[in-house]
Amino acid sequence: MILDSVHVDRVHAPRTPAELTEAIGSETGAVSPVGAGTELEFGNPLGPIDCAIDMRRLSRITEYVPADLTVHVEAGLTLGELQTALAEHNQILTLDPWNGPEATIGGIAATNAQGPFRAAGSIRDWIIGMRVVHVDGRNSKTGGRVVKNVSGYDLAKLYTGSLGSLAVISEVSFKLRANFEKIVTARTRVGSSSEALHLTTAIRRGPVEPVSFLWTGPDNSIYVRFGDQKRAVDWQLSALPAAEWETFEGEAEDALWRGVRRDYKELGEIVVRLVTLPSKIERVVDRFKPDRWLAHVANGVVLLSVESADEIAELRREFPVVIDRAPIEVRRQVPAFGLNGPQYELMKQLKKSFDPEGRLNPGRHVDGEYRA
């Protein structure tokens, strides 16, 4: 197996939580968990490892209580498989990572992967509990199996986005919601970035609550997606500011969002995730003139293409920027997360507390941010 240009001779493929515990606990060297491999270009370059843990056989729904709107799944289950099971009870988990339904639940959690549904919240907003295996083979859990949990340290939020560098996620518990009675997307195109800013600002300040809200370029398309009861969706569509809106529903809407996903894949080899205020997206577009971009208007997260590591450094002079995907040669030149001094020291201490010998996914997260 090749992981991020690192050749791995030994691969464990556990089928049960007990086998996962045994596989990790029996190792004395560096260990790298891997799911469907949809996010291997995210994070710092992986360091030398002794074995990989293939999580894909841990793919059961361990408990599903439709009446409680909760589900508990092993980390190797794919999002597509989970959504199919939930659809039988007219329920949904509003996650849609850009890399698609083939991504595993553990991988989505480990990378905090997000997609068009970002306006409805990230995976952190839907997790109520988690089970993990530590590098020494110990098991622990955080949160619970019901929506109302006792107070305390919510370690699931810490493990989410940590790239498997603190512990290996074995099971995730989610709260769910009823599926949308109706889902419709309105799209329009405007002539300039200033017009796009004016329109998106009016929508943000208005009474509507979209579940997806994107501004894409260079064609300055605005996508506003509503999911709710039929009357609520119809009212929100009528409340949109005046523009030449096209509406899409059913298969036409599915096809529209498949096209947006293709746009993401075609952003380029180097894609960064810039964070700013929604009101400053126009400034980003006009100042840096990316060839293509996808902006989450509700929260100011902008995905944009860049040409080189030097451009990433330039962006970081003004904004927090994470490399969303890039060839390993670029990630060797510039840190993936751009942590400042205090952030780096805090994360380094967390890594040392959870993984003192640095054996879990070495190099992928904070320990690869500033290499000697």
Image (spheres, grey):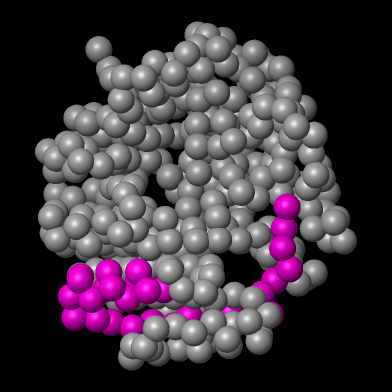
Relative horizontal placement of residue 341, taking residue 204 as reference (left or right): left
Up the image or down, 303 lies above or below 214; here it is above
Q: Quadrant of residue 131?
A: top right
Q: Quadrant of the C terminus?
A: top left
Residue 138: x and y in percent read 71, 17
Residue 290: x and y in percent read 17, 58
The residue shown at (68%, 17%) is 137
Relative horizontal placement of residue 80, taking residue 284 as reference (left or right): right
The residue shown at (80%, 34%) is 150
Up the image or down, 147 lies above or below 309; here it is below
Up the image or down, 178 lies above or below 357; here it is below
Q: Quadrant of the N terminus?
A: top left
**Residue 188 magenta-highlighted:** yes
The residue shown at (79%, 58%) is 69
**Residue 16 magenta-highlighted:** no
Give the extent of the magenta segment.
175-203
Relative horizontal placement of residue 293, taking residue 36 as reference (left or right): left
The residue shown at (58%, 86%) is 235
Residue 267: x and y in percent read 26, 60
The number of numbered badges drawn on the structure is: 0
Q: Quadrant of residue 219?
A: bottom left
